[in-house]
Amino acid sequence: MRPALLVFGYALAVAWLAPPLLARLTARGISARLGLAAWLTAMASAVASAIAALQFLIQAAITGWPNLAEAVCRSVTGSACAPTVYKSAAFEVGLAAAALLGTLTAAVLSWRYGRSVQRARRRTRAHAELARIAGRSLPGEVSGAMSGPLSGALSGAGSAMVLDAEQPVAYCVPGRPAAIVLSSGALAVLDPAQLTAVLAHERAHLAGRHHLLTGLTRALSACFPAVPLFTRGAEEVARLAEMRADDAAVRRSGRPTLIAALLAMGTGTAVPAAALGMPAAALGAATCAVASRVQRLLDPPDRGLLVRYGLALAGVTLLLVLASVILAGYAAPLATHALALL
Amino acid sequence: MRGFGDLEQVIMQRVWDHDRPVTVRELFDELARERAIAYTTVMTTMDNLHRKGWLDREKEGKAYRYTATASQAEYSARLMQEALADGGNTEAVLSHFVARMDGAESEALRAVVARLTERRPR
């Protein structure tokens, strides 16, 4: 019983205490990759610990089974029953009930989780196929002749499709094959260089398989709407994945072009990159997701800050891994020891 | 010519452009003028599109005449609707370049643009 409580306590602590700490470390999107790793490690370690705790609980219930059986046997056959046997049996009944309930809960939750992931995957694939067949190929990509400013960004996974819609929209859909969808409204507000940046951003999502991370964490958040690590974690994973893709687009197109593309798509009006002044003291508090991405791009961290955040995030990640491994290693002998006592 | 998915898109585009029932032979003749392609490839692809619900067909003599089950605009509208739906957890996993914004947020972003594009005093 004790090892189960210990490990479950750890899972709860991570689920409630890790989010505020991690959120502070990843707020500015410095070293987005390590930030992603830290959030994902925290989630994995909480889930793994909860599963380990359940396993210990089941083990304890099995260990207690002979006691329970003995008490039942004696009372049925009418042979002498010491009060201690009954007292112990009451505890064992509770233990068995808890183990059963825990197992049932885990089964229901994992079934729901699997169904949620599966359904989203089906919808995603169907959407990709619809886009691939019903969209028009992006002009310049039709002939397959790769030349001009788009050539580099257009090679690689995910062909770009255009749909007729006024609203500026650009997104990627994973699938076999994947698709990048642009609305005609998006093409109207982006110049060729900005379009290249947008495509580089979406290709980075596809190449980095970000949909796996966002899909799995989103389903986790849906199954555990009251657990901060999973709800906050899903949001943060999605946000950090955007920043990873932004970084890839910056490498391809440069900051001013990406910033202009973000602003153009966000406001629905053309924003020439050349018209943007780049004040170092940026914009004050960011008011929406796009504004905070723009701010991050306007104010890139210096090397010292990168190293500090990198070390802190790597440290937290390592700590989470070590803590769960050590705890499970410490609890496992306790559980088997209890078994051996009988 | 690229992958198979590409051919499905090319053929649907042609069917929509025609705006009347077409036969495999008609589309094959058009496509063969532009690319090296086998008649059976066109036939198989159109058969697949029919099986997947993109094309309706009616027998006329020995051949089928194909029509699109819905217009391209209808498919576009359906895709946009799904793409802009509030990302429920069983919805398609799409990565938008910019997240959907409410009125106040886009207003704030417009202010950002104004701030960044204004001429700064030297």
Image (cartoon, coloured by chain):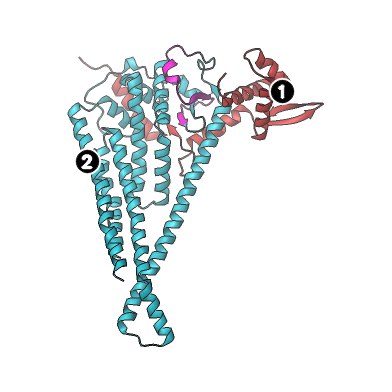
Chain colours: A cyan, B red
Residue A268 in the image: state x and y as whole percent.
42, 25
Tell whether position A110 is magenta: no
Q: Amino acid at mark 2?
A: Gly
Residue A11 located left or right of residue B80:
left
- Res. A191 visible in picture: no
Image quarter hosting the C terminus of chain A:
bottom left
Residue A140 in the image: state x and y as whole percent.
50, 15
Residue A63 in the image: state x and y as whole percent.
35, 68
Which residue in the structure is indicated by mark 2? A315
**Residue appearing at x 36%, y 34% in the figure:** A241
Residue stretch rendered in magenta on the structure: A145-172
Q: Answer yes or no: do the residues labelled 1 and 2 have beta carbons within 8 Å?
A: no
Quadrant of the image occupied by residue B78: top right
Q: Amino acid at mark 1?
A: Val
- Residue A282, compared with residue A40, is above or below; it is above
**How would you rate the neighbour count of disc 2 (Cα within 10 Å): few for under 14, some for 14-19, many for 20 or more?**
few
Residue A127 located left or right of residue A337:
right
Tell whether position A150 is magenta: yes
